[in-house]
Image (cartoon, coloured by chain):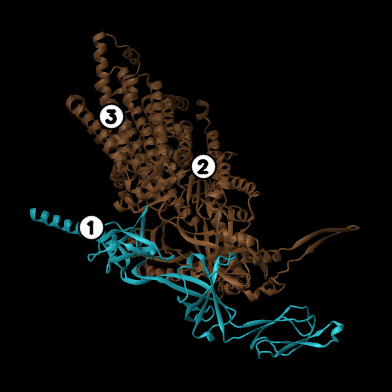
Amino acid sequence: MKNVLFACCWIVLVFRTSVLLSNEASKIKSVFVTDIKKTELFDVYSYPAKLTSEKQSYILAQNQGRVEKIFKKIGEPVAKDEIVLTIKHDDPAFDYRPQKIISPIGGVVAASTVEEGSKVSVGDKLGLIIDPSKIKITVEITLKDINVIKVGTVGKLSSPDTGLEVDAVVTHLSPMIDPLTGTAAAQLKIDRPENFKIGTVGVVTFKANARSGFELPKDAIVYLGKKTFIRHVDKKNIINRVEVEIKPRSSSAVEVIKGVTEGQRVVIKSSGFLQDGAVVKIEEGQKEVK
Amino acid sequence: MKGVYSSPLRVYMIMALLAVIGIYSGLNLPVSLYPNSSKPTIWCQVGFGSLNTTEFLDSYGKNIEYQLKNIENEGLKVEKLKADYSQTQVHYQVEFGWGSDPRKAKSEVTNILNALSASWPKEIRDSLWVNYWSNSSGFVAISFFSDKRTMDELYDILDPVITPKISKIKDADEMTLWNPNMKEVRIILNPEVVSSLGIFPKHIENLIYQSLIGKTGGSITVGLNSYSVQTPRSIQDVLDLKNLLIPLGDKKMIHLSEIATIEYGPIEEQAQIRKTNGATSLLLFGSPRAGGNVKKLAEDVTQIVEESIKELPADIQYRSLVDPSHFIRQSIENVIHEVLIAALLAVIVLFLFVGSISNTITAAIEIPLSMIMAFIVMKMTGMNLNLISLGGFALAAGMNVDGSIVVLENIFRHMDISKPKNFDERLKVIVSAVNEVKLPIIASTISTLVVFAPLALTKDLTNAILGDLAKAIVFSHTLSMIIALILVPTIRLQILSRKNQPVTLPPAPLQGVMKFLENLQKAILNKLISHKKVGMSVMGFFVVAVVIVGVWVVPTLRREIIGKPDTDWMILSLNTHGNSMVKAMEEITDQEEFKLLEELGDYISYTFVQIRSPNQSRIMARLKDKSDMKVVWEKMEAKFQNTPDLFFWVGPWNPAELPLPNPPHALLEVKGGNLEDQKALAEDLIFQMRQKDFFPRVWSEPAVSHNENIEITPNQTTWLNLSSENMMFTFDDLIDLSRVATTGKKINTMTIEGKTAEVFLKYPNQFFDSKEKLEAYPIRINEKIVPFKALAEVSIVNSSLEIYREDAREVIKVYARQDTGKEHLIAQSQKDLKNFLGEYSKQDHAQLDLKSKPSIVVMDESIELTNALNQLGLSVALSLILIFFTLLMQFGGVVHSLIIMVAIPSGILGGCFALFLFDSTLSLNSVLGIILLNGIAVNNSIILVDFIIKLFRAGLSPKEAVLVAARKRLKPILITSLTTILGMLPVAIGLGEGGKILQPLGIAVTNGLWVSTVFTIFLVPLLEYMYLSRKVKVSFDEKVVPEEKESANLPLAEVSL
């Protein structure tokens, strides 16, 4: 009888322990982690870049009258001093002789604002001639960034329609801040301008203040009052909250200035609140956000 | 009385008439699951337009709150007003009291807000939304699907057939055929083109809006005719929209199609996808109007769908997803079965004790008759048949037969003594017999009913839930008294008038058992009386038991308002973050649904999926067998564990639940000091609570956790310079651009191919996916292209713009809750939290750098339940006082009255201990059961004490009086108790649909009653003996026994041992 009782106690104990353990196992939270590595960090400055022709000129009406004939249509090449169109004077004193309007530069007719028969006045813009081979990239630099982006600063110019990205270097920077816009004009140069369309707006991204540092996704930071923490996972998968000092980098990332060392494993996301000292399970593969 | 009994035909006709009216009333009583009770909450939402939170609050919010809080009209009163101000909109919850008419409440709130909105800016006015949602009414959901047709085709076929019919359903409030593929017109601006042309969304919006509305130009009257001057809308279809001309500067125009892509297709961002067993489906969804009957609604809808489906092509199928009528029908049938079983058991008990079929039927007729006649009163008082009122009938089934038993027994006793020979003598005997027990029956009925009287004084939750139960018992029990005093003697007289009818009660089947019990009782009672120490020990044990139960057992009982019915629906909720497309959530949901079916497919009949937003979805699984609920729940919880990317919630769902308060398990309020410090303290407190893991879920209102916003601040100097240049845009246009580019904007609606579609202006999806992209957005100023940040500083700031107000006061509340199914952990968690808070409050919180001194106050989280139980407690106290005074009037002595009332603590002892033993709950039902059994227990005591006093006054010694009375009254006491105990047994077992709701009531009554019966038949005679002995001793000393002289008139034959 005693032995039976003893056996029963053992069975109960084992069962209870396994239940407890399975309960414990089911409470373990899972995490996504990242290993902290020192990387080269930059401050990123993005600007819209206006793509125009370096060489372009409007053809203006020299006299009032009607457009008699258009010799060069949109897209056609035109040489310097070549006749683009003629305007017939409507002033009798000029004996209705057609005025020849010539192209001041060699290039291509980019725009035409008149048709044959249109009435024009002196000074009206009749068309635009550009040299498509000479692309001009203009970026308006804000006052705040003027000490960072200088002549010689290299950035990446990306095209909105092709997505192509090329290096662009600042070649000129206006010494004057336009009071209307609060910006200074900068010109950039690229190697293969033929890949970009004049008249579009690209995006230039400059990287400045290069330095070596630690970057973490914002999701990894725990905010508590005025302090910031990361959740460090040690080799035994135990969580330890560590205070850090951070600096914002972008909407999705921060730079950790103090409090971490290379090789530390840090939690990015977890399946629930992580207590100090909690054991966690590391999950592979963060799902792609759509 | 003579005239009544001697005219049996008259009596039978009246009773028959009442029975017929009763049956008719019963068949026409509305049937629902719960009593007609609701506590409506009206939800409102208002957007801020271009204002920020504080600006809106000061300009409009406070006034709105004042107006809503002070609603007092047509019986409506606002109990609580909650206002949750987030960054872009506010949600108001207007909570009305129990019994408020939801329709009136919604109408009142709508009227107030409409009146206020007249002075609001258009954008704020257009964002106003008011609705009512209550869980009590349940809802109906039927899905339609076809594997040959698209959703639109299905809708086009179903809508004209079904919609006109369902709109006529009387009990329906909102009945709609939801087409998840509702279409919209999307105008997706090309960012590069619009920015290079210097166009802003505002300009395009105004142009489109004007083009979508027709204009009137007055009217011209010519003779008898009147001609209104109108301009039709210039945009009639998508092609017109594409050709809309947008003016640029320098007199140029451009077509809208050159700067934007225009699409007409299913709503993209607000798409809700619904699937049944993996296939998308159209949903017919509706809820009952206020006071409407959800069962009737469900039946009407089902009938319409069944009839309509015959007219439709064969490939169109439907499935009834949520049909409360099925559950309600089964629950009601279940309780009716319980009532019938209760009645049957009562009749069996009667037969076993009484013997003879005719006597049993004579007494038992009271059970159905009293209930049927009670329907008449229920109909007149506007009650309905629901689980609660039917539960009352189940309870009353056993009780109602008592009066008949007493009358019947006394008739036979008198017949046996007097042995009448003719009709007149029999009539005289019967009248005499009835007169003798008339007062005790009336008194005992009143004492049973008096316990319910104070319930009428309760209000709110208590009355809402228990009112019907009390009424059902009061009505049927009162009628049973009348039947016992009128019908039973009439029937008996008629039967006895036939030849060869026995004048004595025939031997009952349990006569031998009865004899044995009487002898056993006599032996035990004799011992208790003769051996003082034994008697004192029993009394001492009783007192100790009551104290132990009261002090240790009752506080540990789980509390709830009312039991929840079993359900066969399980829900798996999915939550993620970061998605912007519903399609993405659909993929995730499909995967999880696959896992669910793979693991638990054998248990699941079908699934219904709702994907409501890009980051939330719900998989509802209908089980094949309700009894698998526990197993399925456990397996689902084990299978679906939170991951860092995906959060799950698993739990049962019942579409027909009562709208009970669902308070958190801990509630704290942070008070005092300034708002910033309150938030800092709340944030730290929540962190510590999560760290200690008292409760798995801890949250606050408003949210106090770290929050960041993008703040756009105009560069004042630049704007000053720009304004002098007559620029075509303002800073507001920039903000508007940001809004259109991030969330899109509804412009208006237009009708295409006979269908209304909303028109949205937007940018490509996720165009601004970071602050940096916003900063770099190109803005054209003359010939220059400048970045957005040149005109306004874009920065990420820490902010907690959320403001939470209750009853016009800013509060910060911290809530905590345990998971469903882990209620046994709540008490310990609350205790641990309390201990922690004691320490936490003493800390100086230096790390928080507080400038003021906020503090943490622990609130009563289940205040409504506490109030309800307190009200009930007050009712109990009041009913005890009433019982005491009733007894005092009847017996004229305080001591006798108190001795009779000893049955009450014994009943409470038995009831509470049984609730503890069977892991049941202290709920309104079980407390009511305890109240009720007080009445029944006291009746047993009354029967006993009344006879003891009579015998004592007749000249018997206290011991003799006590022993004789106990023996003589054992049988009626046992009959009374057993009929009620067995009658409540099916309820106590809690089988079938809805069984769980009334189970605590059954457990409390059955166990409380048998315990109190045992104590009554021993303890009460013992106490009477002790009191009467002392009285005899005192009067012996004084040599005066006045009562004995009066009682000497009673024939001694009546008191033979």
Q: Looking at the picture, how far across and down is residue A264, in whole percent?
A: 27, 67
Q: Quick check: A81 above or below B30?
A: below
From mark 3 to mark 1, how far is it between C-alphas? Answer: 56 Å
Secondary structure beneath label 3: helix
Chain letter, colour brown in render: B
From mark 3 to mark 2, how far is it between C-alphas? Answer: 68 Å
Secondary structure beneath label 2: loop
Tell us which disc is closer to us: 3 or 2.
2
The answer to which of marks 3 and 2 sits earlier in the sequence is 2
Q: Which residue is mark 3?
A: B967
Secondary structure beneath label 1: helix
Tell us which disc is closer to us: 1 or 2.
2
Q: Quick check: B188 above or below A248?
A: below
Q: Do we see residue B949 in this rendering?
A: yes
Chain label for disc 1:
A
Crowding near pointer 3: few (<14 within 10 Å), some, many (20+)? Answer: many
Tell us which disc is closer to us: 3 or 1.
1
Q: Which residue is mark 2?
A: B808
Q: Which residue is mark 1?
A: A20
Q: Do we see residue B264 in this rendering?
A: no
Callout 3 amino acid: Arg
